[in-house]
Image (tube, coloured by chain):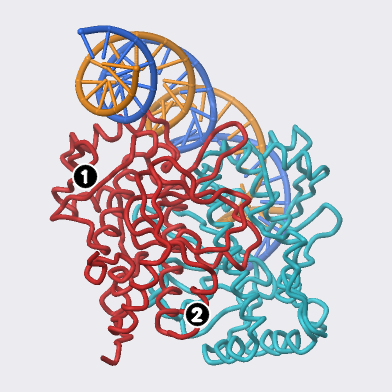
Chain colours: A red, B cyan, C blue, D orange
DNA sequence: TTAAGTGAATTACATAGGTTAAGACCGCAT
DNA sequence: ATGCGGTCTTAACCTATGTAATTCACTTAA
């Protein structure tokens, strides 16, 4: 397995800090232990669980979600390759939400002790994990803005910009295309819209030539145009080049 | 100043971990240095800023918010007494949102070095700060659920349950009443509703006898009933008694 | 080869919530 | 006391989005 070149966690963190060879080795080792697989529509963790491991997604998509009592469901965020399922959970008693797979999923299950060991020995990795957690918080804030203020069309366009850029950061895009393994029902749960309206909105985005969506493949012919339609400002992803200030000493 | 008894940060953190006398002293000292005041409707930090200090709210309310280009505005979260304005910001380059005061505000401005010193010397405080940050993330996730799935009435009821419980945790309630220094326009910006609809919804909550709202005082005659109306489950605030497992050794 | 299941698309209709506008109320500065 | 700006309230009307139901395409499984 050629993890050295393709470990999505490394690719992601290197958007923030250049890692030393040793640090990369540590991450690769971690990502090769305790690897699990599950099919689509499975739960990795359920609300109420008290996980003693940290899960790192290596390939496939998952999502955080929460059900209301009457069956309504909200997808809270997408967990993409290179993302942790439950960073720092050890501090809280129980999960306050569930995490489920949207596609077949490969993930590494790291025991608590292993995580603590890595962060203790490698302060810069620890720093990078913190950066990652802060970016996730920023994404969650941006979802608040989308759900609160953006109309259906803007909201969908915004989500697609975000997903495309996040996937690009972990080497999962090809040109202006990427995978979008979401059903319209999935999009609906994520955006707080009905399935019918998701469909309408998708048609509209297609008619405007802002997206091409065939099967599970999303193509964005003109990213700048899509960003405009979404009022998308990438600052919250904190990918600014200036972020690369913590150079490794190798 | 009798901070020992009333420092809201200490009150909040002690919901999670019992602090030693020394740890409390450290927090009190921090909260008494560099104290600032500003009036209502001022900005403490603006999107794009690169803060070199950490602000701790001692009294009054603030909010995180973001503007869209056409003037729409979303309040992303409320910053209450005992809350940090910008935890861990040092890691990110720039603020991706602004923080403004909703009332006259007192806050302590801690220089970066001071914060790093405290977390380095007092691991349990560091742990408690982490708990706090994780609870904030959980609150943000719950807002995602509210904005995505809950109808206006549930959403308003939910917000009021949350605010009441958060304020109770820092000793800012009296019986079943608390301060609610929000205009209806403020609520609208927070809940993604129009002012008119906030007004309608408030009338409805009043008619159902779920809340009494006079001036800036909110009274909740029957918290359980309000929670029901909101489908409110407090688990995401992580206040479970079991959380008190990290007892101090004093 | 069919049957069953899932996802996409489309139509007709219903409604929660938005918009605009106008009064009423209240504190405050002159 | 007067006027003024902020806030709340209400009304009339409008629209973005939801609901329900149907059809079509495609896959899988027997």
Give the percent coordinates (x, y) of residue B54. 55, 81
How many labels, in total?
A: 2
Q: Is residue B155 above or below residue A92?
A: above
Quarter placement of the N terminus of chain A: bottom left
Residue at point 43% right, 49% down? A63
Residue at point 33% right, 40% down? A182
Front in this rendered view, residue B231 or B206: B231
B227 left or right, relative to B194: right
Front in this rendered view, residue B170 or A44: A44
As helix, strand or loop, the secondary structure at mark 2 comes to: helix
| Mark 2, residue position | A117
Q: Is residue A208 above or below residue A114?
A: above
Q: Is residue B209 above or below residue A59?
A: above
Between marks 2 and 1, how big is the CA–CA gap? 40 Å
Give the percent coordinates (x, y) of residue B157. 67, 43
| Mark 1, residue position | A218
Q: Do tags 2 and 1 sit on the same chain?
A: yes
Q: Chain of mark 1?
A: A
Give the percent coordinates (x, y) of residue D29. 33, 23
The image quarter in which residue B28 lies:
bottom right
Quarter placement of the C terminus of chain A: bottom left
């Amino acid at each position: 397995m050629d993890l050295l070149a393709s470990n999505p966690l490394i690719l992601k963190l290197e958007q923030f800090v250049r890692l030393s060879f040793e640090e990369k080795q540590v991450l690769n080792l971690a990502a090769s232990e305790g690897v699990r697989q599950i099919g689509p529509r499975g739960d990795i963790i359920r609300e109420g669980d008290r996980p003693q491991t940290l899960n790192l997604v290596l390939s496939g998509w998952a999502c955080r979600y929460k059900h209301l009592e009457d069956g309504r469901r909200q997808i809270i965020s997408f967990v993409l390759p290179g993302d942790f399922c439950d960073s720092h959970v050890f501090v809280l008693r129980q999960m306050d939400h569930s995490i489920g797979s949207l596609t077949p999923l490969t993930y590494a299950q790291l025991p608590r002790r292993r995580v603590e060991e890595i962060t203790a020995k490698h302060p810069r990795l620890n720093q990078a994990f913190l950066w990652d957690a802060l970016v996730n918080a920023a994404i969650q804030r941006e979802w608040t803005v989308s759900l609160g203020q953006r109309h259906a069309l803007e909201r969908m366009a915004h989500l697609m910009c975000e997903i495309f850029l996040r996937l690009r950061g972990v080497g999962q895009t090809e040109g202006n295309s990427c995978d979008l393994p979401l059903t319209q029902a999935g999009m609906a749960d994520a955006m707080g819209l009905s399935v019918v309206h998701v469909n309408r909105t998708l048609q509209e985005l297609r008619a405007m030539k802002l997206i091409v969506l065939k099967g599970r493949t999303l193509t964005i012919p003109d990213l700048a145009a899509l960003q405009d339609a979404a009022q998308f400002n990438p600052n919250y992803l904190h990918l600014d080049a200036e972020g690369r200030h913590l150079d490794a000493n190798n």
